Amino acid sequence: DMIQVPPGLRVVAISPPTAEIRMERLAERKVPLVPRMVGEVAAGYALEGRPVAEPSTVLIRGPSSVLAQLASDGLPLAPVDLTNAEGPVERTVDVASALPKHVSALTALRIKVHQGVVAIRGERALPDVALITVGFALADQQPVLELSAVALFLKGPVPVLSRIDPKAISVAIDLAKEGKRLPGVLGVTKLLHPGDVKGLPPGVTVTTIRPDRVLVRFVKKDAPVETPR
């Protein structure tokens, strides 16, 4: 008599003949949210730290045993795609699946997820960087460099290093002081510094210049000039 059936039909058996009803106290509990990352970042980049969810927990209500299990496992969030990322990633996501039966969220389930992505640092050598002179002001003389190029050793983000065009880089020797010297000065040896390197992109530093000094001769403009080696 507990089951309604169409006219002409009757229930002759129920299997199983009994049903167990379990009563459980409702509770409220903060459950941690578990961010998930998928995909590979761009070449030359790496993850920085672990992903962070904001907020990091959600307040839910439901049977105490279910809440205890969720508090232990955490509530997984929908995955965040990091494919070809070249910088920090921020996405707003939902929980990955529906909450268990008899469980409801008391706070919003739209969660911001942050994942740091940074460029890997590395080194690169530029074996043939042009030497140039600047600031020379004597009208009847010209500077002649002993060398036409030097080697630079650089350090910085790998993606930035790989994009450097050696032809866009130069080492500028400032001869402003020598241009004010009295006539008769035949030459001077200049020590090369990282600050003399021009055209480097931000984030890249010079670790070594080889050779680190160069001889500059001063000759009259009508005198024959030897080609630097």
Image (spheres, grey):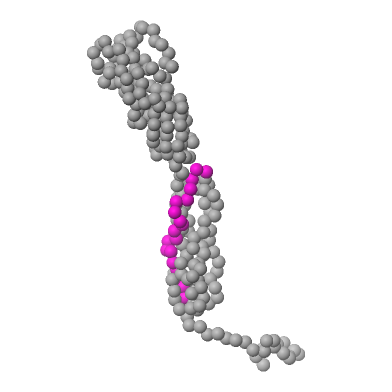
The quadrant of the rendering that contains the C terminus is top left
- The magenta-colored residue range is 43-61
Q: Position of residue 55 (x, y in %)?
A: 42, 63
Q: Is residue 106 visible?
A: no
In terms of image quadrants, where is residue 181? Answer: top left
Q: Quadrant of residue 171?
A: top left
Residue at 48% across, 56% down: 91
- State whether residue 72 appears in this view: yes
Quick check: 224 left or right of 72?
left
Above or below 226: residue 168: below
Say which residue appears at 51% left-offset and 73% top-offset. Answer: 69
Residue most extreme to the front: 211
Q: Residue at x 34, y 29 (%)?
A: 193
Closer to the camera, 106 or 201? 201
- Magenta region includes residue 54: yes
Residue at left offset 42%, top offset 34%:
154
- In the displayed image of the protein, which residue is found farthest to the bottom? 1
Question: In the displayed structure, would residue 162 be above or below residue 175?
Answer: below
Q: Position of residue 3 (x, y in %)?
A: 67, 88
Q: Residue furthest right?
A: 8
Question: With respect to residue 85, does 124 lie above or below?
Answer: above
User: Which of the 4 image quarters holds residue 187?
Assistant: top left
What secondary structure is the magenta-colored segment mainly? strand
Of residue 66 and residue 77, the one placed in the foreground of this image is 66
**How many numbered discs?**
0
Q: Decide which of 214, 1 is in the foreground and name it.
A: 214
Instruction: Name the image quarter holding the N terminus.
Output: bottom right
Percent x, y for residue 54? 42, 61
194 inside magenta stretch: no
Give the image location of residue 143, x and y in percent.
34, 15
